[in-house]
Image (cartoon, rainbow, N blue to C red):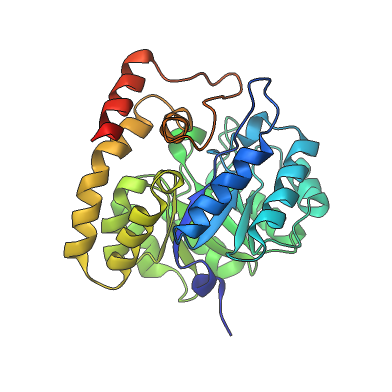
Amino acid sequence: MNTLKDVLKGTGVALVTPFKKNNDVDYDALHTLIDFVIDNKINYIVTLGTTGEAPTLKTPEKTDVIKYTYEIVRKRVPVVVGIGGNNTHELIKDLETFPLDGAVAVLSTSPYYNKPSQEGLYQHYKMLAGASGKPILVYNVPGRTSKNIEAETVIRLANEVENIAGIKEAGGDMQQCMKILRDAPKDFLVISGDDALALPQIACGMQSVISVASNAYPKEYADMVRFSLSGDFKKAKSINDKLIKAYELMFSENNPAGIKTFLSEMGLIKNNLRMPLVPLSDKLQKEIKAYLKK
């Protein structure tokens, strides 16, 4: 029997949410993007993450995006749904009401702004896990939430809470990652959340990555991850070296403004974001255009 660790092995794409000029969700562009990443061999899709601008989507829009994603994916690859925030009881309602029948797991970012203690983080995820009919993937991204989920808390959740199936680790702390990989249960999934660190993190034992860059470079990025997982780090490094500049450009000012500029220049979506996000500076957009021309 396959575990979630088997199902979500490889490259997951943190899918953007395309918008029209009037700020409505652009479902035609979403269809195009989903087919593009699947045709280019990504392993799974993550919808309604931070890259998908979930905080600016209303609940009916989130429901529609989830349903549409299932419809277009047609079970070709697994789908993970992002349901995160800083109001535990509201998140429990979302877990009970959102259409999660087509999802294999829920990715839930840690509470932002509130800055709970480690015990608060533990109890938050324990409550979510108890309310969810799908496995929960903890999402540690202290650069956005201002609070790190420490390795000890992750291991405690992994050992004590049955429905906590893994973590997307995007803290950039390699020592913390290695502690989690050393001490987590065998079937606990540890996912890289840093495009630029995925290669060395796979070398340390991670088996999956949720990537922003794979929106624009699904084949290249997925190949890099596959080579890394098979132990062919020479080939993986060759691909990764070519993408390092792209990572720098994508994350220089804002995510997803960076990746949306790449996708717009590639003709896959329009370069529209919802406030408070705005397009990249003219200078950076010109740098991206020059990079793509190469």
In what quadrant of the picture does the N terminus appear? Answer: bottom right
Quadrant of residue 213 in the image? top left
Residue drawn at x 56%, y 24% as measured from the top left: 272
Task: Answer whether residue 281 is visible to the viewer in this image.
Answer: yes
* Up/down of 164 relative to 31, above or below: below
Left or right: 131 as drawn, with respect to 257: right
In what quadrant of the picture does the C terminus appear? Answer: top left
x and y percentages locating residue 120 in the rendered image: 61, 45
Task: Answer whether residue 146 is visible to the viewer in this image.
Answer: no
Residue drawn at x 74%, y 59% as measured from the top left: 132
x and y percentages locating residue 123 in the rendered image: 65, 52
Q: 190 or 15: which is nearer to us?
A: 15
Q: 251 or 192: which is nearer to us?
A: 251
Left or right: 60 as drawn, with respect to 208: right
x and y percentages locating residue 60 in the rendered image: 80, 38
Residue drawn at x 45%, y 39% as measured from the top left: 142
x and y percentages locating residue 78 in the rendered image: 59, 64
Quadrant of residue 87 in the image? top right
* Up/down of 31 relative to 162, above or below: above
Left or right: 65 as drawn, with respect to 48: right
Q: 207 or 30: which is nearer to us?
A: 30
Q: Residue furthest top?
A: 282
Q: How many marks?
A: 0
* Up/down of 239 relative to 135, above or below: above
